[in-house]
Amino acid sequence: MIKKKKKQESIIDSSLKRKYKLQARDVKVWYGDFMAIKGVSMDIKPNKVTAFIGPSGCGKSTFLRLFNRMNDYVDSFRMEGEINIDGEDIYDKSINVELLRKQVGMVFQKPNPFPKSIFENVAYGLKIQGIKDKKFLQERVEESLKQVGLWNEVENDLNKSALALSGGQQQRLCIARALAVEPSIILMDEPTSALDPISTAKIEDLIYKLKEKYTIVIVTHNMQQASRISDSTAFFYMGDLIEYDKTNKLFTNPEKEQTENYITGRFG
Amino acid sequence: MVIERTLLASSLITIAVTIGIILVLSIEAVNFFSEVSIFEFLTDTEWTPLFTDKHFGILALLSGTLLTSFIAIAFAVPVGLSISIYLSEYAPKSFRRTIKPLLELLAAVPTVVYGFFALMVVTPFLQSIFPEISSFNSLSAGLVMGIMIIPYISSLSEDALHAVPDSLREAAYGMGSTKLQNSFRVMVPAASSGIVVSIILAISRAIGETMIVAIAAGQQPRFTFDPTVPVETITAYIVQVSLGDVQHGSLEYKTIFAAGITLFIFTFLLNTLSYRIRKKFQEKYE
């Protein structure tokens, strides 16, 4: 677990806090002696898709997982710096991590539905909040499944095990599960890397639609995917944020040589 | 070549011994049932083969076995499960690594020591709270047997919980679950088949346990579910007759085979059940 720092004054200008959904200031992360993130600052606007790219081990997943504190479970994890969501320091002592994670949904690399029915999977987040109203649960489940375009495929099988679905369906179910609790941010950690091209295309379409309501941050290995779906892209290398810009600009006219080498396939 | 044959021979020996045991049990039991009707065996509530007025109601022994086993399970399941959930979902890794082998040590204590412990420590303690309890009773024997089978449940259940993929833990925590919600709503259901198997094996172990109940539960066959009075379990009866001076080949002698085959059927069914569940469990995660 993290050693709590003393309550301190935020280093971020309060006028900026209103403008940005997510803000990271001078964030450093260590796993034991290994420094995984070497001082990264970044501002992310609401209702945009932001892609993190970079070679394996560059720190992009670690950085993503800071936003819902999923690194807290790693024994040797330690961090410095500040991360704000809607202007609030999420590593502050007063933050309830469970509540934070209800606001910041996450979709993982491998589809990970619970070994429960389709219905129970989507209703899970609501049920752990103590919601028991059957009608409300049914409405939210239906709505969430419709949002991810899965409703027509599973409408009559809601009580069947989620494990019987295909990989692509499972991943959309996991997105529906995250949407059901109405988060404002969705973190996606290489959500299509285990899927076939058709399922991938469906999820990409979905991400494009979801940004109307949600702020989406996606880690991807696939540069075409980043250029297709994101508004901004951040290129990470060896724990540093090398370049962060509008996706169009970063892919057509990068400022840094390292970025250019990476996106043209010279390494990585 | 020699090694290969030796290995084959040793595996054949175990099969031969198993078949031999089943054969002997069956033949002697058939002999017994040619003299005593199965109907009487299953419905009579008294078991007095060593007295002049002979009764052969297995229920009197079976109730002792079921009662002590029930007490043991009722004690061991909540404790064992709590331990397994704590070790798998809460405890730091280093603590888990140290404590698990120590717990398994509980299963390595000779059962005669447990029996002695039940009779000399637990029973007097219970009597200090409830003075009406007899010196031999199924409560004390059951509780101590429960302690003995805790590691079966905690260790096997912990293995099952530990085998649940981390991706499910991430999913649960990512949805905002507390540790408690993760444990009981995701981990325990996901590991349920392994947990059920551990409980069945523990029941099987409790039903077959001999020393503790022979020492602490008494030797009075009695059709009762009162945990404060002396009873006799099937296993304890077999010990009593085997050690006594019953004439070889007599009807009294054959009763131990009838009792033995009853016990065997129970443990055999339980082990088959756990094997089936385990097979289903393996398929699920592959």
Image (spheres, coloured by chain):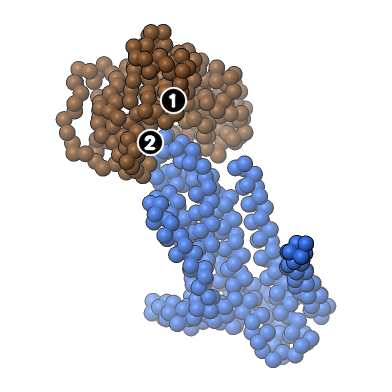
Chain colours: A brown, B blue
Question: Are discs 2 and 1 located on one and the same chain?
Answer: yes
Quarter-of-image position of residue B16:
bottom right
B268 to the left or right of B29: left
Residue depicted at x 63% and y 47%: B282
Q: Is residue A227 above or below residue B84?
A: above
Residue of label 2: A70
Q: Is residue A213 above or below residue A194?
A: above
Residue A106 x %, y % = 43, 29
Numbered disc 1: secondary structure: loop
For the residues marked 2 and 1, what is the alpha-carbon distance in whole angstroms? 21 Å
Viewer-closest of A210 and A67: A67
Q: Which chain does the residue under circle 2 lie in?
A: A
Viewer-closest of A50 and A101: A50
Q: Is residue B280 visible?
A: yes
Residue of label 1: A55
Residue depicted at x 47% and y 17%: A265
Q: Which chain does the residue under circle 1 lie in?
A: A
Which amino acid type corresponds to the residue marked 1 in the rendered image?
Pro
Viewer-closest of A202 and A137: A202
Residue depicted at x 49% and y 64%: B104
Residue B9 x %, y % = 76, 67
Viewer-closest of A218 and A244: A244
Which amino acid type corresponds to the residue marked 2 in the rendered image?
Met
Q: Is residue A211 above or below residue A82?
A: above
N-terminal-most mark, 2 or 1 = 1
Q: Is residue B176 above or below residue B13?
A: above
Residue B13 x %, y % = 75, 69
